[in-house]
Amino acid sequence: MKHVIVFVYVMLAAPLSFASPSWQSQIVGAPLAWNEGLTGRGVTIAIIDSGLDLTETRAARTVFKNSADPINGRDDDGNGLVDDHSGWNFQDHDNDVGTDSTHGTRLAALVIDREAGIAPEATILPLKFLGPNGGYVEHAVEAMTYAVRMNAEVVVLPWGSERHFQIVYEKMKELSDAGILMITAAGNSGNDINGFPEYPAAYGLKTLITVGASTRDDRLAAFSNSGMLVDIAAPGSGIELETKNGRTSLDGTSYATSLVAGAAALIYEKFPGLTAVEVKARLLKSADPISAHIAGERLNVYKALR
């Protein structure tokens, strides 16, 4: 029997005008890293979410390419997935990762956008398991397995549920034991997840980073979950992003995960020999103090690189 996981971290977007670079990139020190030539090149970030609109210029430029399985109607690499050239749709069991992909596309953009993001040359591996009504945890587990098979250095899990699913925990524990860096959203309920847990945010695994949302004035966003199980905050309130439909302002801890994922990509690029535990430690120890409600404070990628 399949179990539905509720997708709880989508929040509304509003029109906005802004200048380059965005405030969220500046506040975490991304332009300083760019000045040193760091862009995330050579680092693959798997985003397990609602997919990716491959007609977006940014997506087409940085999307993962599985050279072992070109699009020809055959399963050339023998992994049971036909033409998984640029990710996979585990919800519909095909290679169309672009259906209902608004949230996943925004997540990817906040990694790779040269104005609003952190790591403009990181590679995005889109793995779709969510649709408008949520998704099945079994599909999320399959996507995690695939991400490891494709050698993703960073796995982003920007969703959650109040319900604990053992199969999700066991797969994440397996990834953690294998040294895979995972980044998940703390959730948007405004609770302390030590007392009111949401998962996978509350799993506390050694290579898992749980991310809360901070504001432009360096406060913890009112909607963001908090507590000692939240490792770090990153901008996630009033996030600025250019989309197909114009410039928008985004809110949600899921968007904050993208910025931390981008920061991790820069660290892996500069220090390719680091383990996931070491990358996590760098991010947490270099964070700037903003709040007593989280363990790791607010992301500072430039300090993490020093």
Image (tube, rainbow, N blue to C red):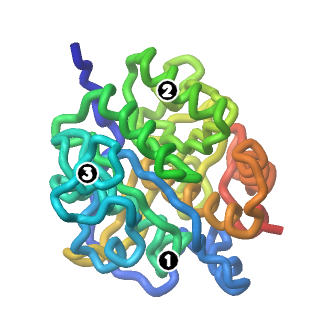
On the rendered image, what quadrant is the N terminus found in? top left
Judging by the rendered image, the residue that carries numbered circle 1 is 22
Measure the alpha-carbon separation of dots 1 and 3.
Answer: 42 Å
Residue 214, horizontal then vertical, whole percent: 55, 53
| Along the line of sight, the residue nearer the viewer: 19 or 9 | 9
Secondary structure type for disc 1: loop
Q: Amino acid at mark 1?
A: Ser
Q: Which badge, 2 or 3, comes first in the chain's sequence?
A: 3
Q: Amino acid at mark 3?
A: Asp
On the rendered image, what quadrant is the C terminus found in? bottom right
Judging by the rendered image, the residue that carries numbered circle 3 is 75
Q: Nearer the viewer, mark 1 or mark 2?
A: 2
Give the residue at x 32% y 27%: 137
Give the numbered dot on residue 88: none
Secondary structure type for disc 2: helix
Measure the alpha-carbon separation of dots 2 and 3.
Answer: 25 Å
Give the residue at x 51% y 47%: 155
Callout 2–callout 3 Cβ contact below 8 Å: no
Q: Is residue 95 visible?
A: yes
Give the numbered dot on residue 171: 2
